[in-house]
Image (cartoon, rainbow, N blue to C red):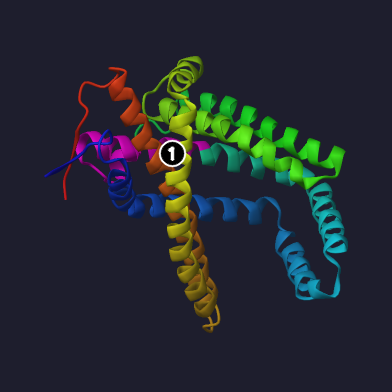
């Protein structure tokens, strides 16, 4: 048996955790996508026709200038939303609630794997509906507000270069709140406890180190994803089953990205919580 030791081997531990979580996470993400797609078609029966119109428009997108294309796309999206607003609201609620349930499932899965060497799908299904959902909602509202603030600045100044200094400032904030999600999901902390925990861990050197590692790992991951995406584009041309297979590949790519990020912040949570004495052990068993 091997052990997770995130204090000394953060990167290998994260990739090991990613491999162990990938299949159960893929199954859960696929269920989520199918439920949302089915509910959308039921609640918005004319949505397939709208999607067909958008597809036709995309085929002629090369005839438009970029600014003109963005304006037309915005008008079309607003038009679709305004016509089906009453139906989109429950779909939006389902998306948000389903996303938070996915958070609970994923953090149940990662903590079970790290602490007990158990990466079973059924083992992560416990306590999917609990108070953590409320704390996720509060965190999401704050992060959404930060994004809207950035968007407001860009629109007011008309200068997209303002995004660079804001991004430099926002990186520690994003890191802070992302680690807070892990503190809520794994440590079952309250909203204020999680903020206090992450505040103690936020240092310039630590953020810079994690950011640098994340950039390098993301580049490597993106290269692998591009290969898979190219394969998916080729598969999509297969008659009858090509579209379904391409959809499965799309869900797989989504799962890889989301699980990679979640595994990374899981490792960081255990790394920092063990230093603060919140965990009894610094090493955790994983079975091969």
Percent of width and height locating residue 44 = 71, 53
Q: Decide which of 8, 60 is in the foreground and name it.
A: 8
* Disc 1 target residue: 210
Main secondary structure found in the magenta portion = helix
Residue 241 visible in rendering: no
Which of the 4 image quadrants contains residue 46? Answer: bottom right
The residue at the far front in this view is 205
Residue at 60% from the left image edge and 51% from the top image edge: 39
Left or right: 190 with respect to 169? left
The residue at the far bottom in this view is 239
Residue at 53% from the left image edge and 29% from the top image edge: 177
* Image quarter in which the N terminus is found: top left
Q: Decide which of 83, 215 is in the foreground and name it.
A: 215
Q: Decide which of 268, 233 is in the foreground and name it.
A: 268
Q: Decide which of 158, 100 is in the foreground and name it.
A: 158
- The residue tagged with tag 1: helix, strand or loop? helix
Residue at 51% from the left image edge and 69% from the top image edge: 229
Left or right: 113 with respect to 174? left
Percent of width and height locating residue 187 = 36, 24
Percent of width and height locating residue 15 = 32, 50
Residue at 73% from the left image edge and 70% from the top image edge: 55
Percent of width and height locating residue 129 = 45, 30
Residue 196 visible in rendering: yes
Residues drawn in magenta: 100-125
Q: Is residue 63 magenta?
A: no
Q: Is residue 133 above or below residue 50?
A: above
Left or right: 139 with respect to 62? left
Q: Is residue 251 above or below residue 62?
A: above
């Amino acid at each position: 048996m091997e052990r997770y030791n995130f204090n000394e081997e953060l990167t290998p531990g994260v990739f090991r955790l990613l491999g162990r979580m990938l299949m159960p996470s893929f199954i859960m993400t696929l269920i989520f996508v199918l439920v949302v797609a089915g509910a959308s078609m039921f609640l918005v029966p004319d949505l397939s026709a709208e999607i067909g119109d958008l597809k036709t428009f995309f085929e002629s997108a090369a005839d438009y200038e970029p600014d003109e294309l963005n304006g037309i796309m915005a008008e079309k999206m607003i038009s679709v939303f305004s016509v089906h607003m009453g139906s989109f609201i429950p779909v939006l609620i389902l998306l948000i609630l389903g996303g938070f349930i996915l958070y609970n499932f994923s953090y149940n899965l990662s903590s079970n794997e790290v602490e007990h060497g158990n990466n079973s799908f059924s083992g992560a299904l416990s306590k999917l509906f609990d108070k953590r959902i409320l704390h996720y909602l509060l965190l999401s509202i704050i992060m959404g507000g930060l994004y809207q603030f950035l968007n407001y600045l860009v629109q007011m100044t008309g200068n997209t270069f303002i995004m660079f200094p804001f991004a430099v400032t926002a990186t520690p904030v994003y890191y802070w709140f992302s680690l807070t999600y892990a503190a809520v999901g794994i440590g079952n902390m309250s909203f204020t406890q999680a903020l206090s925990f992450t505040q103690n861990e936020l240092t310039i050197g630590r953020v810079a180190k994690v950011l640098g590692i994340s950039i390098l790992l993301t580049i490597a991951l993106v290269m692998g994803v591009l290969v898979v995406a190219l394969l998916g584009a080729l598969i999509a041309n297969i008659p009858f089953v090509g579209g379904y297979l391409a959809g499965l590949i799309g869900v797989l790519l989504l799962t890889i990205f989301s699980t990679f990020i979640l595994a990374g912040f899981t490792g960081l949570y255990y790394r920092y919580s063990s230093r603060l004495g919140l965990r009894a052990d610094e090493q955790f068993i994983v079975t091969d």
